[in-house]
Amino acid sequence: MLQQIGNTRSNKQIKLNDLRYITYASCLNFFHTNSMFYPWSFGICYAVNYTWVKRINNNSYSRQGAWTTAERKSSISPETMHCFFCPQSTKTLAEVLQEDQDLICYKDEDERLVITCYYYKTENYNKSLLGFYILEPSLLENTVLIKYKLVITPKPGLFPGTN
């Protein structure tokens, strides 16, 4: 979805509203409706972290992160999802390696995008609502039940994103 969102626009840069709808659509196979929003009828909510880098030279990277989540009680539809871009920054190779080795690019001007999806437990979590009658997923981090990471090379011009 990220790769195709700007195909019909002259300005291909990804925007906050694009991320909201991409995040919403990416979990419809599980939620099907607005159940991903408050009051979280399945007892879990969804969030996506986007981390983009572009290699400037062998020790310098341009980096931008973005976060989209339905974990706030004010998030009741895609339009109200909490979403933001972090300011673009410059990182060294060591800093990028420390963050995530999947972000390493091998040629100048190459780009990488790591998309990490999270399913969080909410206050009304009940394992049987998800079909876990006997076993329950163990928590990965704090309240994270499920975490999935995808690494892609984005189309040139999508990032850095704009507000």
Image (cartoon, helix red, strand yellow):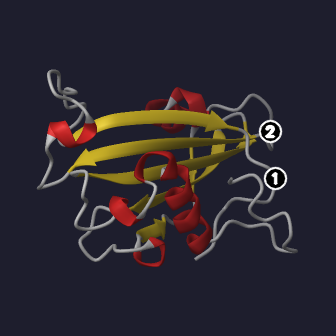
The crowd level at tag 2 (other Cα within 10 Å; few <14, some 14-19, many 20+) is some
Name the residue: 84% across, 73% down.
9
Residue 29 location in percent, x, y?
50, 46
Mark drawn on residue 100: none
Badge 1 or badge 2: first in the primary sequence: 2
Q: 35 left or right of 154?
A: left
Write the residue at 22% across / 27% down. 137
Q: What residue type is labelled 1?
A: Pro
The location of residue 157, given as percent across then percent down, is: 80, 59
Residue at the extreme top of the image, as rendered: 135
Q: Residues within 10 Å of mark 1 (few under 14, many from 20)?
A: some
Location of residue 27 with respect to 14 vertically, above or below:
above
- Front-most of residues 67 and 88: 67
Q: In this view, does 46 lie to the left or right of 133?
A: right
Of residue 144 and residue 131, the one placed in the foreground of this image is 131
Give the residue at mark 1.
156
- Residue at image position (41%, 71%) is 81
Residue 76: x, y in percent?
34, 74
Can you identify the residue that label 2 sits on?
A: 108
